[in-house]
Image (cartoon, rainbow, N blue to C red):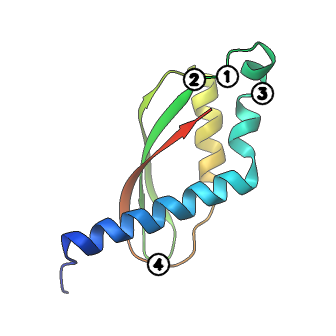
Amino acid sequence: AVKPSRMQMQGDRRLRRGQMMAALEESKRPTRCLASLAKQGLKDGSFAVFEMGVTADGTQEYLNLRESNLSPVVVQCLRRAIDAESLPSGPESSFQFRLDF
């Protein structure tokens, strides 16, 4: 198998990150995870950075939390929201994405 070029890998990461961000934005699941923080006025400035691996068929290989200022309960809710999303077939890729609230 031919190893993809660095430029191709960057393009693959951009594509997959964009697909995941669009899916999460459309689903509104992450916003629901922060509903209790929003009611308390504590949502602004909240964030979580995840690292994810996706196979060519769109299956999640792994999902790791890299950084966050959210409680473990909210992070678990976000993980479930991300796990509920499916990506279309495309390039196999590993990428990071940040959810800002």
Q: Nearer the viewer, residue 71 or 39?
A: 39
Q: Which mark's residue is nearer the viewer, 2 or 4?
A: 2
Q: Earlier in the sequence, mark 3 or mark 2?
A: 3
Q: Which mark's residue is nearer the viewer, 4 or 1?
A: 1
- Residue 21 position, x and y percent, is 58, 55
Q: Give the side of residue 61 with respect to residue 42, left or right.
A: left
Q: Is residue 29 above or below residue 9?
A: above
- Residue 84 position, x and y percent, is 66, 54
Q: Nearer the viewer, residue 47 or 3?
A: 47
- In contact (CB < 8 Å): disc 2 and disc 1: yes
- The residue under label 3 is 35
Q: Which amino acid, mark 2?
A: Gly
- The residue under label 1 is 43
Marks 2 and 4 sit apart, C-alpha to C-alpha, by 33 Å
Dot 2 crowding, Cα within 10 Å, few <14, some 14–19, many 20+ = few
Q: Which amino acid, mark 4?
A: Gly
| Residue occupying the far bottom of the picture | 1
Label 2's element?
loop
Marks 4 and 1 sit apart, C-alpha to C-alpha, by 34 Å
Marks 2 and 1 sit apart, C-alpha to C-alpha, by 6 Å
Label 1's element?
loop
- In contact (CB < 8 Å): disc 3 and disc 2: no
Mark sitting on residue 45: 2
Marks 4 and 3 sit apart, C-alpha to C-alpha, by 33 Å
Name the residue located 64 percent from the left edge and 43 percent from the top edge. Answer: 80
- Residue 41 position, x and y percent, is 74, 14
Q: Which amino acid, mark 3?
A: Ala
Q: Earlier in the sequence, mark 4 or mark 3?
A: 3
